[in-house]
Image (tube, rainbow, N blue to C red):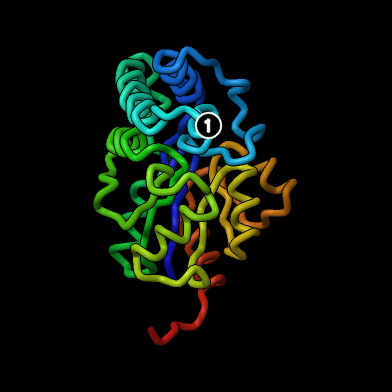
């Protein structure tokens, strides 16, 4: 089995700072404003997809996207000392991931709709090195439905062997699209329950309970 973790809201307890920093980075580079900071209002809510949609038809779009990535990460680093609570892991998150590895419960990968640079910084703030895990970000592919399979492929697993940890409505959408079981984590657990996700946890404090759910979802090993 492969446990694939989203980042924001699932590992890192991201709250208020990221959205404004992302919007400011786009405005600083392009002079354009985002229509909304509500990611649920976007058809494809990933960092690269929103930027590419905004810059559609601009021949300088690739260069501007790279500049936005740099500016976004710079702004996050600037804001981190002022809002340290936005750059810490959910309670028990790091220990839970380490336990999955140490007890050989399952392999771990990370799949995030963030840019690679911003994901790496936020995870570093949480004490996690992104490069220690097979991973995929929206810098690899803008579509969330492609990010998870890419992370799985880099971990050398089939998508049918994945359990996904996510925190948001769009995670529910993509997990159903990919027919991947999802464990809900984070601040939106009531919303996730309302969307039909049965297994939800506010954080990783009760790691035994989460591992019992994982064991219940485990499928027979496949011959590779």
> In the image, what residue occupies the spot 27% across and 40% down?
127
> In the image, what residue occupies the spot 30% across and 55% down?
133
- Left/right placement of residue 59 relative to residue 42 reads left
- The vertical placement of 183 against 89, above or below, is below
Image quadrant where one finds the C terminus:
bottom left
> In the image, what residue occupies the spot 74% across and 46% down?
194
Of the pair 100 and 165, the residue shown nearer to us: 165
- How many numbered discs, if any? 1
Residue 185 lies, in percent from the top left, at: 54, 46
Of the pair 51 and 119, the residue shown nearer to us: 51
- Left/right placement of residue 143 relative to residue 128 reads right
Of the pair 6 and 154, the residue shown nearer to us: 154
Of the pair 60 and 26, the residue shown nearer to us: 60
- The vertical placement of 179 against 21, above or below, is below
Q: In the orientation shown, which residue stands out farthest toward the bottom?
A: 223
Residue 17 lies, in percent from the top left, at: 46, 21
Residue 18 lies, in percent from the top left, at: 45, 25
Helix, strand, or loop for circle 1? loop
- Left/right placement of residue 125 relative to residue 11 reads left
> In the image, what residue occupies the spot 35% across and 33% down?
118
Quadrant of res 178: bottom right
Give the residue number, with chain letter if any, for mark 1: 56
Residue 212 lies, in percent from the top left, at: 52, 66
Quadrant of res 120: top left
Dot 1 crowding, Cα within 10 Å, few <14, some 14–19, many 20+: few
Image quadrant where one finds the N terminus:
bottom left
- The vertical placement of 69 against 81, above or below, is below
């Amino acid at each position: 089995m492969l446990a694939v973790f989203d980042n924001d809201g699932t590992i890192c307890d991201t709250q208020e700072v990221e959205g404004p920093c992302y919007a400011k980075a786009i405005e600083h580079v392009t002079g354009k404003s985002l229509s909304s900071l509500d990611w649920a209002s976007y058809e494809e809510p990933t960092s690269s997809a929103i930027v590419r949609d905004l810059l559609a038809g601009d021949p300088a779009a690739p260069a501007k996207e790279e500049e936005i990535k740099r500016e976004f990460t710079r702004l996050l680093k600037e804001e981190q000392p002022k809002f340290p609570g936005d750059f810490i892991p959910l309670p028990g998150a790091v220990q839970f991931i380490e336990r999955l590895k140490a007890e050989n419960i399952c392999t771990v990968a990370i799949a995030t709709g963030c840019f690679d640079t911003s994901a790496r910084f936020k995870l570093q703030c949480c004490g996690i090195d992104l490069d220690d895990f097979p991973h995929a970000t929206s810098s690899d592919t803008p579509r969330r439905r492609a990010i998870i399979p890419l992370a799985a492929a880099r971990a050398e697993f089939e998508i049918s062997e994945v359990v996904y940890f996510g925190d948001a409505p769009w995670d529910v959408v993509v997990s159903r699209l990919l027919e991947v079981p999802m464990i809900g984590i984070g601040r939106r657990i009531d919303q996730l329950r309302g969307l039909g996700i049965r297994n939800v946890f506010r954080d990783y404090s009760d790691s035994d309970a989460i591992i019992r759910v994982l064991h219940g979802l485990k499928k027979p090993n496949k011959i590779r």
